[in-house]
Image (tube, rainbow, N blue to C red):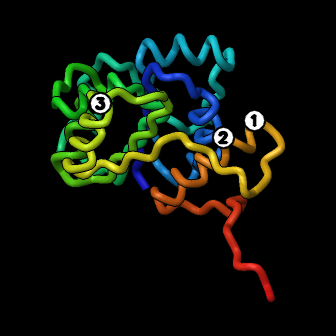
């Protein structure tokens, strides 16, 4: 799989780190882009992002990357965390940064675009922007953890969301908690 992982300035760097910990750069071509605000939030929340070897990093101000062109074949893009400002700019099609241009390309080429907003509460503007990106073909996967697996750590709580991202990507996730019917 050829995958773009991006992050913008919403709180939730733990989701990004846990996703990076679970993707396999030896098996997939993975590109990483962080906005300047994402870099600030990462420093505040987790100190330093651990980027596995084999993941290619790009700045958010370059259009000299393959995934900002529709002619380059990529499978999916995930923005985690995704600020509501980013959702709004994607909905408006502004494309003024690498992340926004890539999201625009993934929508126009009908490629999988997964947006993981973490902000709450939402305003009516946020809700309308979410509807717009859904109508354009994006998957909106709010960072809403589940608790039926009884997670015991912050990382385990974050993993409940990361498991859903991996499922949407179609990537193996043997550690995911799967709901089972009670045996009678």
Number of residues whose C-alpha sits closer than 10 Å to that of mark 3, classed few (under 14), some (14–19) or many (20 or more): few
Q: Which residue is mark 2?
A: 158
Number of residues whose C-alpha sits closer than 10 Å to that of mark 2, classed few (under 14), some (14–19) or many (20 or more): many
Query: Taking 22 as reference, is 116 above or below it?
Result: above
Residue name at image x 48 percent, y 18 percent: 38
Locate residue 174: give its quadrant: bottom right
Residue name at image x 46 percent, y 28 percent: 121
Q: Earlier in the sequence, mark 2 or mark 3?
A: 3
Task: Verify CB contact (< 8 Å) between mark 1 and mark 2.
Answer: yes
Secondary structure of the residue carrying tag 1 is: helix
Residue name at image x 80 percent, y 88 percent: 184
Tell me how far mark 2 sits from mark 3, CA to CA. Answer: 27 Å
Q: Which residue is mark 1?
A: 154
Task: Verify CB contact (< 8 Å) between mark 2 and mark 3.
Answer: no
* Quadrant location, the N terminus: bottom left
Residue 136 x, y percent position in the rendering: 20, 48
Task: Verify CB contact (< 8 Å) between mark 1 and mark 3.
Answer: no
Residue name at image x 63 percent, y 23 percent: 49
Tell me how far mark 1 sits from mark 2, CA to CA. Answer: 6 Å
Secondary structure of the residue carrying tag 3 is: helix
Q: Is residue 56 visible?
A: no
Residue 165 x, y percent position in the rendering: 51, 51
155 vs 137, left or right, is right
């Amino acid at each position: 799989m050829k995958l773009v992982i991006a992050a913008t300035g919403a709180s939730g760097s733990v989701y990004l780190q846990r996703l990076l910990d679970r993707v396999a750069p030896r098996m997939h071509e993975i590109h990483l882009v962080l906005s300047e605000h994402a870099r600030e939030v990462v420093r505040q929340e987790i100190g330093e992002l651990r980027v596995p070897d084999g993941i290619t990093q790009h700045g958010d101000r370059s259009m000299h990357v393959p995934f900002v062109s529709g002619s380059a074949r990529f499978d999916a893009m995930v923005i985690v965390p995704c600020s509501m400002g980013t959702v709004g700019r994607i909905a408006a099609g502004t494309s003024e940064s690498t992340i926004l241009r890539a999201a625009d390309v993934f929508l126009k080429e009908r490629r999988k675009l997964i947006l993981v907003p973490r902000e709450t509460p939402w305003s009516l503007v946020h809700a309308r922007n979410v509807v717009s990106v859904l109508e354009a073909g994006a998957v909106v996967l709010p960072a809403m953890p589940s608790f039926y697996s009884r997670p015991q750590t912050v990382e385990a709580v974050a993993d409940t969301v990361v498991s859903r991202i991996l499922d949407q990507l179609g990537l193996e996730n043997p550690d995911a908690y799967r709901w089972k019917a009670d045996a009678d």
